[in-house]
């Protein structure tokens, strides 16, 4: 999730407690001030409908597993190429 306030953007990665704020390197006092400002922006965040909300919502596999029919096969060609290059698979 990204939160923007004017030209300032902070990116949050869920389930990792990770906050990414692009910009110059900060010393500890600047870092602490930046963290306080970021926390204030999170607390003052107002939910709004955005472009991304127009896309499909996630589904639980268990809820629709019986109705699914395969439409194709996924081939990982990078792994095939690596197997040929390492000699695991021989060309003829």
Image: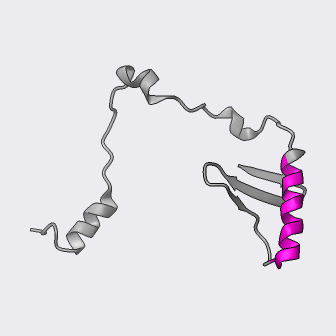
Relative placement, left or right, of 70 versus 91 is: right
Residue 12: x, y in percent?
Answer: 70, 54
Tell me, yes or no, if residue 7 can be seen here.
Answer: no
x 80%, y 77%: residue:
24
Tell me, yes or no, if residue 74 can be seen here.
Answer: yes
Report which quarter residue 58 is drawn in.
top right
x 43%, y 25%: residue:
62
x 32%, y 31%: residue:
70
x 17%, y 73%: residue:
87
Vertical placement of residue 55 versus 9, above or below: above
Residue stretch rendered in magenta on the structure: 26-42
Report which quarter residue 85 is drawn in.
bottom left
Residue 14: x, y in percent?
Answer: 64, 49
Vertical placement of residue 64 versus 53, above or below: above
Vertical placement of residue 68 versus 33, above or below: above
Magenta span contains residue 35: yes
- Of residues 92 and 26, the one nearer the viewer is 26
Relative placement, left or right, of 71 versus 90 is: right
Report which quarter residue 83 is drawn in.
bottom left
Quadrant of image for the C terminus: bottom left
Residue 7: x, y in percent?
Answer: 87, 61
Dominant SS type (magenta): helix
Residue 71: x, y in percent?
Answer: 34, 33
């Amino acid at each position: 999730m990204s939160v923007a306030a004017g030209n300032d953007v902070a990116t949050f990665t869920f389930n990792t407690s990770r906050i990414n704020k692009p910009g110059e390197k900060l010393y500890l006092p600047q870092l602490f001030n930046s963290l306080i400002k970021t926390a204030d922006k999170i607390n003052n965040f107002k939910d709004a409908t955005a472009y991304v909300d127009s896309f499909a919502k996630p589904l639980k596999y268990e809820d629709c597993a019986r109705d699914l029919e395969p439409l194709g096969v996924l081939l990982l060609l990078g792994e095939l190429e690596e197997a040929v290059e390492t000699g695991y698979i021989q060309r003829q």
